Image (cartoon, helix red, strand yellow):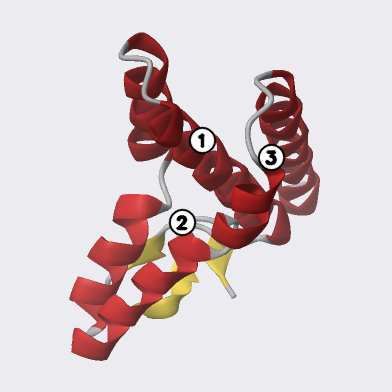
């Protein structure tokens, strides 16, 4: 039953990843920047050099949809293309991570996430 729920969540994230890529394509944004920035959110793992709590806070700041959808909305309504682009790229990254089973981090270590332990 738990595995079934995890699989449903993974499929949900896969659908969101595809949706983000389709929207990105429809907006005719740069695929070069998509390739360059797709893994950029993982730079925020460097916070773990300063301990588990700082690491979790920095990682979670960029790996949540509130931040990325805010960027999309700001980019759309203020007509700021780079903001829109980064919002979509980072949202796609989050969906990809969650599809792979990587979730938001808890304070007790990188492998402890809201989706379970890695």
| Disc nearest the viewer among 1 and 3 | 1
| Disc nearest the viewer among 2 and 1 | 1
Q: Which residue is mark 3?
A: 13
Say which of 93 and 60 sits in front: 93
Q: Would residue 108 be seen by someone viewing this image from the given angle? A: no
Residue 30: x %, y % from top left: 64, 39
Say which of 94 and 117 sits in front: 94
Alpha-carbon neighbours of circle 1 within 10 Å: few (<14), some, or many (≥20)? many
**Quarter of the figure that contains the C terminus:** bottom right
Q: Is residue 82 above or below residue 49?
A: above
Alpha carbon distance from label 3 to label 2: 15 Å
Q: Residue furthest bottom?
A: 49
Q: Would residue 23 be seen by someone viewing this image from the given angle? A: yes
Which residue is at a point 77% across and 34% down the rendered structure image? 18
- Kindly state the secondary structure of the residue where label 3 is placed: helix
Alpha-carbon neighbours of circle 2 within 10 Å: few (<14), some, or many (≥20)? few
Residue 87: x %, y % from top left: 46, 36
Count of picture labels: 3
Q: Is residue 85 left or right of residue 4?
A: left
Q: Please report whichever mark, 2 or 1, sits nearer to the chain's N-terminal start.
A: 1
Q: Please report whichever mark, 1 or 3, sits nearer to the chain's N-terminal start.
A: 3
Q: Which residue is mark 2?
A: 114
Q: Is residue 7 left or right of residue 87?
A: right
Is the residue under label 2 in contact with that under label 3 (CB below 8 Å)? no
Residue 46: x %, y % from top left: 33, 80
| Disc nearest the viewer among 3 and 2 | 3
């Amino acid at each position: 039953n738990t595995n079934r729920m995890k699989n449903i969540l993974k499929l949900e994230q896969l659908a969101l990843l595809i949706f983000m890529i389709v929207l990105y394509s429809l907006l005719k944004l740069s695929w070069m920047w998509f390739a360059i920035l797709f893994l950029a959110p993982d730079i925020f793992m460097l916070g773990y050099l300063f301990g588990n709590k700082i690491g979790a806070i920095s990682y979670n700041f960029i790996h949540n949809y509130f931040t990325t959808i805010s960027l999309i909305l700001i980019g759309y309504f203020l007509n700021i293309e780079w903001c829109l682009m980064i919002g979509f790229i980072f949202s796609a990254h989050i969906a990809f991570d969650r599809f792979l089973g990587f979730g938001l981090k808890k304070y007790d270590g990188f492998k402890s996430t809201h989706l379970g332990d890695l």
